[in-house]
Image (cartoon, grey):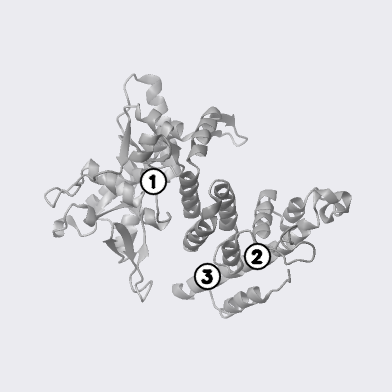
Amino acid sequence: MTFSTAELDQRIALARAFEGDDLASTPSARLVELQAALVQVHRMAEVALGEVAGELARRSDPADGLAGVARQRGFASAGKMLAGAMGTSESEAQRILAVADVVAVRPAEPGRGGEGGAPQGPRFPMLARAVKSGAVSMEAAAAITRALERIGNVAPERLGELEERIVTKARSLSMRDVKRMLLSEEARHRPADIALRDQVAFENRYVQIRDEADGSVGIHARLDVSTAAPIVTLLQAAVKSVMRSRRDNAVKKGKTGLDYADDDRTPGQIQADALSAYARHALGCQEVPTGVTTTIVVRGDVEALRSGLGCAKVDGIDSDVSIGTMRRMAVDAEVLPMIMGGPSTPLDVGSRDRLFSTEVKLALVERDGGCSWCHAPPSFCEAHHIRWWKRGGPTDIANRVLLCVSCHHRIHGAGWEIEIREQQVWFIPPASIDPARTPRIGGRAHYELSS
C-alpha cells in the first residue's frame, strides 16, 4: 500500500480557511463549518495512522518471535506499542488496528492468483471506501466490522447487499444509533444466537457493591434484559415524572425555556434518589410503592411467536430478546406483551379526546421507538400533538409524535416543524439553521434499516 497524505492535506486546507478567526466572535454557523472541517481532519489522520499501524502490526506477527517490530522495541504486541505511542488504552489501539485490517489490501491467496498474483481487495470494500473518505468514523467502522463478521457466518450470500445498506445508513448516524441499528440487524439474522445470549446473560447476572476511596458507595450491575427491564422502566419513569413536574410548575409560574425548574437534579441524580426511595419503601412497607406507575412493554411479531423463532423488543432497552424470553416475561402481570402483525386495530380516536389512549401510545412507540428526535427511551416521552389540540388538531396517529420533555420544548421553541409522511416522522429545520429547510427523518426509521 502506498502511503499518501493527499486526502489529509485536502481536509487540512479546508480547516486553514478559518485561520485567524477569533472564535469568541465567530458567527455560530461558521463555527459549525469549522467543526465539520476538523472532524474530517481527525478522521483522515486516524485513517493514515491506521494504515501505518496496520503495516507495523503485520511486521509484529507473533510467529516472528523476537524478530517482530513490537518485540524488538520492548512491547508484547503491536497493539501495546500503538497504545504506548498514542498514550491511550490498548482497547483504543486495537480498535484502530481492527479497522486498518478491514481497509487494507490483502496479499494474494493460494489458488486465487498464487505467488505473484494480484492482491485481494479489502474484506468489506464499501466500508473501506467510506472509512478512507471520512464518511464513517473509525469507531463506527469497528462496530460494523464485528457485526458483518458475525452475520456473515449465517448469511454469507446476503453480506454484500447488507454491507451496502448498513454503510449507507451509518453515514448519517451517531455512534449510539449505529449500535442500535447493528443490534437489530444481528438479532434479525441470528435469532437462535439471541436465545443462547439471553441464557448466558441470565446466568452471569450480578450486582457488585463496594466502598470507594472517596467515601461513596459504588454499585455496579450487569443484568440480562428480563432482569433489568423492571429496574430500567422504573428509573426511567421516575425521570419522566420529574421532568413533567418541572414543566407543569413552569407553566403555573409563567416561565419558559429549559432552565426554569426549581428541581435542578440531573437524570442520574433523579434515578439514584428513586432507587433509594423504593428500597427504603420496601424495607418498611408491605405495599407496592405508588409514586411512579408504568408498564413494561414487550413487542414481538405474531409469526415469530407462533414458530418460536425470532426476537422481541423491550421498550427502553436497545438489545433484543428471544421469543422464549418474551414468553417468560409475559407471565408477569406487570409486563404487557404487544403482538405485531395480522389485521391492525383502528387506533384513531378523533378530536373529542384531549389525551391519547393506551393503544395509541403503544402504536406510537412502535413507530417512533422513543423520542423521535433524540431517541430517549419511551418512558421519558409523552405523546404530543403536532397541530395543537386547542387549535383544532385531532388526537389521531397522523397528528402525534413521541417526544421527551426536553426535545418538545427545544424543537417547538426553535421553530422546527414536524410532519408525518407514510408513517414516518420528519423534522423540518427553520431557515436560520438550514436555508433549504431539508427534512430530516426521525423516529425508529432514523436508525433502523428498511426491510
Q: Which mark is residue 36?
A: 3
Residue 149 vs 220, above or below: the answer is below
**Circle 2 sits in a helix, a strand or a loop, which is it?**
helix
Label 1 Cα neighbours within 10 Å, binned few <14 / some 14-19 / many ≥20: many
Q: Distance between the residues labelled 1 and 3?
A: 29 Å
**Circle 1 sits in a helix, a strand or a loop, which is it?**
loop
* Amino acid identity at mark 2: Val
On screen, residue 93 versus residue 130, left or right, reads right
Q: Where is residue 180 in the image (x, y as percent from the top left)?
A: 47, 50
* Amino acid identity at mark 3: Ala
Label 3 Cα neighbours within 10 Å, binned few <14 / some 14-19 / many ≥20: some
Mark in front: 1 vs 2:
2
Residues marked 1 and 2 touching at CB (< 8 Å)? no
Q: Is residue 19 visible?
A: no
Q: Position of residue 343 (x, y in %)?
A: 24, 44
Residues marked 3 and 2 touching at CB (< 8 Å)? no
Q: Where is residue 295 in the image (x, y as percent from the top left)?
A: 32, 35
Question: Could you tell which of marks 3 and 2 lies nearer the N-terminus?
Answer: 3
Mark in front: 3 vs 2:
2
Circle 2 residue: 47
Quadrant assignment for the N terminus:
bottom right
* Amino acid identity at mark 1: Pro
Question: Could you tell which of marks 1 and 2 lies nearer the N-terminus?
Answer: 2
| Quadrant in the rendering for residue 432 | bottom left
Residue 278 vs 256, above or below: the answer is above
Circle 1 residue: 377
On screen, residue 90 versus residue 290, left or right, reads right
Q: Is residue 113 visible?
A: yes
Q: Distance between the residues labelled 3 and 2?
A: 17 Å
Residue 121 vs 436, above or below: the answer is above
